Image (cartoon, rainbow, N blue to C red):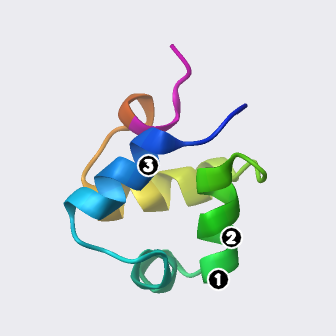
Amino acid sequence: MAGKNLKMKAARAGMDLSQEELAELVGVTRQTIGMIEAGKYNPTLNLCLAICRVLHKTLDELFWEE
């Protein structure tokens, strides 16, 4: 995954969740969520799936590069 993950950030904001709240829901640190959104960290598939579940999105919607 290259570049910022604006889709994840938009989905999180759309559910009115802070990075801290999303991190707590998926069991990681706020820093991890921040790094994923900034494109500086490549999350595991399990973490991607956990984020998708919380944000009610598919892997394609959040993580697939067009």
The Cα–Cα distance between marks 3 and 2, rounded to whole angstroms, is 13 Å
* Left or right relative to 12: residue 35: right
- Which corner quadrant of the image does residue 58 belong to? top left
Look at 59% across and 67% down and name the residue there: 33
Percent across and percent down for residue 47 are 59, 59
Relative vertical location of residue 52 with respect to residue 54 in this rendering, above or below:
above
Question: What numbered label is drawn on residue 32?
Answer: 2
The answer to whether marks 1 and 2 mark residues whose Cβ atoms lie closer than 8 Å is: yes
Crowd band around label 3 with a 10 angstrom C-alpha radius: few (<14), some (14–19), many (20+): many
Look at 60% across and 80% down and name the residue there: 30
The Cα–Cα distance between marks 1 and 3, rounded to whole angstroms, is 16 Å
**Residue in the foreground of this view, choosing between 58 and 38:** 38
Question: What numbered label is drawn on residue 29?
Answer: 1
Which circle's residue, 1 or 3, is located before the other in the chain? 3
Percent across and percent down for residue 11 are 31, 51
Relative vertical location of residue 19 with respect to residue 13 in this rendering, above or below:
below
Residue 18 lies within the magenta run:
no
Pointer 3 residue: 8
